[in-house]
Image (cartoon, coloured by chain):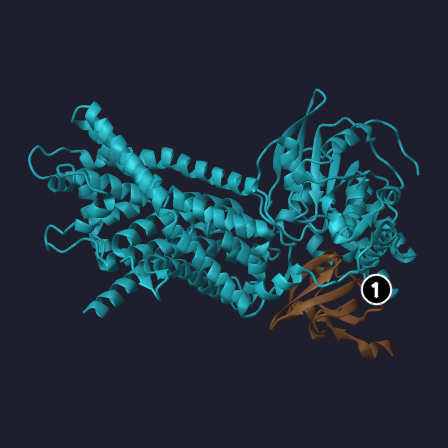
Amino acid sequence: MPKMNLKTLAQTPAGSTVTISHLDSHPDTCNRLREVGFCENATIHLVSSGSSQLICEVCNTRIGLSYTTADAIVVLPSKE
Amino acid sequence: MNSTVQKISLRTIALIGNPNCGKTTLFNELTGLRQKVGNYPGVTVEKKEGKILIGTEEITVLDLPGTYSLSANSLDEKVVTDILFGKIPGTPIPDIVVFVSDATNLERNLYLLSQVIDLKIPTVVALNMYDRIQDTGITIDTAQLRNEFGVPFIPMTASKGAGIKELLSSFENIVSNTDGIRKWKLPDIVRIEHEELVSILVENEKMAESAAFHEAQLLLSTPKDIISFSDEYSGETLTHLQRDHNNLEMNGYNRHSVFVESRFRWTNSVYKNSVRHTAPRHQKTVHDAIDAVLTHHIWGFVIFFALMAVMFQMIFTWAIYPMLLIGSAFDTLAHLISAIIPQGDLQSLITRGIIGGVGAVVTFLPQILFLFLFLGFLEDTGYMARAAFIMDRIMNKVGLHGKSFIPLLSSFACAIPGIMATRTIENPRDRLVTILVAPLMSCSARLPVFSLLIASFIPNILLFGFVSLPAVVLISLYLLGLISALLTARLLKSTVLKGPKPAFIMELPPYRIPTLKNTFIHMWERSLLFLKNAGTIILGVSIVLWFLATYPKMEEGTSSEKLAHSFVGRAGHVIEPVLKPLGFDWKIGIGIISSLLQREVFVGTLGTIYNIEHADEESATLKQQMQKDKDPVTGQPVFSILTALCIMVYYVLAMQCLSTVAVVRRETNGWKWPAAQFVYMTLLAYLGTFITYRVGLWILS
């Protein structure tokens, strides 16, 4: 069951590569995330995660997110 | 594909693209101008204009702020859409869009490109930073990209001037309106609803097709209530829009995401067909190793504060030597003029008024240059975005996010670019809070005031054998400004400007080695600005002050008695009761009032006043004159360590800058917020200084 593997980006360990399943937040936040590359089906590589923020790579760009924002990104393990 | 072959008449070119892809570097290369560039998103926040000669035609080139989309989420992004849709009076819709894209990061850039192409403005893509694609391990099939988008893709490296000629010659071949290039596809039901709404916007709202095509997507995906558009659209359009929203939702579409997703699906497939990764992706790089340290939740802060400490240490040690040279050059000039011009009012005006005032301020130029050298280094390497990233945790505690830290850090140089940089903040309340607290960050204009007082009254001793006490005092002053800004932001965000905590999304650019050219251009321009201020405002104030401190004349008496008899002396004694609770005498009061326009005038004012007061003595530096100044009534020194600290606390917290007031008025569209800001900062300064003075007296007693 793919749904069993769903978790948020904030719960993903550093070094993993995941695929975005969907975004779960206010539409404004979701649209902003999509426009910077966090679109459904996009692949994300989690570079590092700290105590309240993380750094990931999406569309070949490095982006810093707070955990609150990363919690809005629901991901699946990547096929890559 | 159905293309017309009519050549366009070229008058205006606009540079558009994602943040930090090199638009301003290309703009500078095309126009020969020297607009500020930096390695962090949001350096350009307003439209910049330049000229270029193509053949015999003079063409206007517009450098626009970076944007991720045409949704206009912030004020800087709105500049882009306003220009593309011809909403700025006097600025025509560009004849050609040069879409600047970072060739090493094409994947995300294609999304905005497809939006720009939807507008049917002739477009050329500048694949910038092309020299780096080999290092990144990618190959780009430009012919395939051209095929998909229907526009030319020109490989180039703007920073080295490569590809400029090819870009310019591509303009000559470009033709107007190319049809059939909107290749991305919407699901059928969504497409039909979108097409209907486009027709309604064209017919009812008299919009151009390309504007209606874009607007219909925004309206169909908007999370806002339809009622909020009642001022902009007719009832018929809004009724239709409501029906469209219902239809899409009934058919199971997420109308907020369907447009972005459909577009991304197409651009991703184009990317996969056109760009080949020859090296495996997500490999650990040296950038990862640097980021692991610089953005670490503990080491990140340690390094940030260590860098700040190095900056202040540098300002206080290395800058001293050129400062001494400038100081002695002004002394020599004053002696020369005294030897040429006979004793009298003219000699006094030039040597004591002008050289005393302007010279006292210009002496601090080396320190300001060191400050800009350091900040330029932070901006160009890519560290600025990392500083904002690590500060997000602290900023979040006061209700803002890390993005607000960039304007605050820029305000260390000057509050004006700092306030302008707030245009990148999406949430209007957060932007306003950042504007209101930005002038509390200690800017370069405060540096002469701090340096004069620290050099005169803080003992130059080493702490722990390597950190000088003056540098520690200077860091403390900067920290006082930062902490006051954060506490004020917290107060504003929990009272008058309450709002939800914003989502933090920050692009972290790749690390780059700063170019000497860029750093020196920036330092050169800041020096010119500083010298221009010294040559205009400070010169003007020095002349007026000399007059007010010389007249009305008193025939008999010492220089001090003559000064007390002058207009300045009389005015100073009137305001003295207000300043006495802060431990300030009337001369300091005159310095504070005369520097309401600009902070560094304080140093010029003291330079002029002390030069006139000590006219009958052997020449001495301002520092020496201040150190030996005594209160004529009590016989106590006018300046002590405590007085110096009180003045510095006052200058950390007070507004004292007319240009900042004017910029805040412009950025907030009225006088309400600059007036509130001036009042709160003045009260805060008075209260802060009063507490410092009282606590200081208590400790000394």
Choose top left, top right, bottom left or bottom right for residue B658.
Answer: top left
Determine the chain carrying the residue at label 1: B
* Residue pictured at 88% horizontal, 38% vertical: B179
Lateral position of residue B591 relative to residue B292, left or right: left
Q: What residue is rendered at 20% in x and 31% in y?
A: B348
> Which chain is assigned brown?
A
**Residue B372 placement, left or right of B467:** right
The quadrant in which the N terminus of chain B is found is top right
Q: In this view, does B51 lie above or below B639?
A: above
Residue B687 visible? The answer is no
Residue drawn at (65%, 54%) of the image: B509
Q: Residue furthest left?
A: B556
The picture places residue B246, in percent across and down from the top left corner, at 83, 62
Q: Please tell me whether residue B7 is drawn above or below residue B578 in the rendered image.
A: above
Return the residue found at the far front.
B465
Residue at the extreme top of the image, as rendered: B56
Q: Which residue is drawn at 25% across and 55% down?
A: B457
In the rendered image of this protein, does residue B658 appear above or below residue B242?
above
| Chain B color in figure | cyan
Residue B488's image quarter? bottom left
In this rendered view, identify the residue nearer to me: B234 or B206: B206
